[in-house]
Amino acid sequence: MSISTSHRPAREWLLLVLALILVGGAITPVWQLLGGPQMREELARKWTDERLLRLFIGPEQVLCYLCAVWAGLILQSRYREVLRQRRAFTMDLLPTEEGARILPEDARPLNRKIEQITAGQPLILANMVRLGLGKFAISKSAPDVAEVVRNQADVELSRLIATMATVNYLAWAIPAIGFVGTVRGLGGAFGVRESDILKFTDQAKDQLNIAFDCTLVALVLSLIVMYFLHMVQRAEETLITDAQQYCQEHLLLRLYDPAKDGGI
C-alpha cells in the first residue's frame, strides 16, 4: 500500500542535473579561455601512468579501499533490508475499506491474521501494528495504543542507529588512515639524509607525494562512503516515519471505543 505524503518530495536528482548544467555552463568558457593546449600538455606530462599508479596504489590506499568496500557491502545489505521491510506496506495487515472500524474484540483476531500473513518474518510495520492491537485488546484505549506505537517507533529507530555503528566507524577510519599515510610521508621527507642536493630534493618530493596522495584518496573515499551512509540512513528514517503514518491512518483513526460512543 502506498503512503500518502503531506508535501511534495524534492526531486534531488533533477536538481543535481540542473546544478551540473549551471556549473558546467559557467566553468566551460573559463576553461576554454584560460586552459589552452599548453595547460593540457602540462597536465599530461605530470599525470603519467607511473604517477597515477603511485597515487592509487599504496599500503594506506589499500587499507582505505578495504574499509570503503566493507562499508559499501554493509550499506548495500541495509538498503536491501529497507526494501524488504517496505513490502509489509503491500500486505493486507489491517482493514482499509472506507468507514471500517476496529473494535476491542477485533484486536486479537487481527493479530492472528497478521502472524499468518507475515509468517513470522521480522517486519517493523507488522510489529508496530501487532503491539498496538495487543494494547487495544487489553486497555481498550486509543491514547494508550498511540503511546505504544510511538514508543515502538522510537525503539526501532534507536536500533537502526545503533546497528550503524560499524559503518560510522569505517567512515571515520578512512580519513584517519589517510592521515597516517600523510604523517608517514612527511616523516620520510624530513628524515632524508643526502648530501647531494638533487638526490635530496627528489627523495623529499617522493615522500611528500606519498603524504598528499594518501590524503587525497582517503578524503575522496570518505566523501563517497558518507554520501551512501546518508542515503541509507534517510531511507531507514523514512521507513519508520511511513510506518507511523500507516498506523495513524489505518489503526489509530479506526479504533472504536464503545465507552465513549465513538472512535479516535
Image: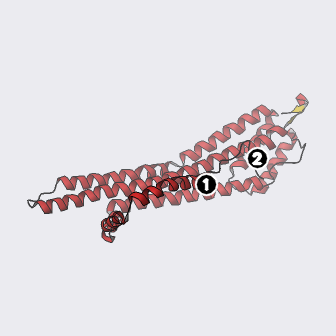
Work out how far the residue at label 1 is from the one at label 2, CA to CA, in angstroms. 21 Å
Of the residues shown, which amino acid type is indicated by label 2?
Ser
Of 182 and 159, which appears nearest the observer?
A: 182
- Between 7 and 181, which is closer to the camera in this rendering? 7
Q: Quick one: quadrant of the C terminus?
A: top right
Q: Identify the image quadrant of residue 129.
A: top right
The residue singled out by tag 2 in the image is 4
Q: Where is residue 239 in the image (x, y as percent from the top left)?
A: 67, 48
First of labels 1, 2 by sequence position: 2
Question: Residue at image x 61%, y 54%?
Answer: 13
Q: Residues within 10 Å of mark 2 (few under 14, many from 20)?
A: few
Circle 1: element type: helix
Image position of 200 (left or right of 63): left
Name the residue: 60% across, 48% down. Answer: 234
**Category of crowding for the residue at label 1, using alpha-carbon neighbours closer than 10 angstroms: few (below 14), some (14–19), many (at least 20):** few
Q: Which of marks 1 and 2 is in front?
A: 1
Asked if residue 83 is positioned above or below residue 47 in the image, the reply reads: above
Up-down relation of residue 142 to residue 176 (above or below): above
SS of the residue at dot 2? loop
Q: Residue at x 63, y 39 (%)?
A: 154
Numbered label attached to residue 217: none
Is 249 rendered above or below residue 215? Answer: above
Residue in the foreground of this view, choosing between 98 and 135? 98
Give the label on residue 13, or none.
Answer: 1
Q: Nearer the viewer, residue 52 or 2?
A: 52
Q: In the rendered structure, are the residues bearing label 1 and label 2 in contact, judged by CB atoms less than 8 Å apart?
A: no
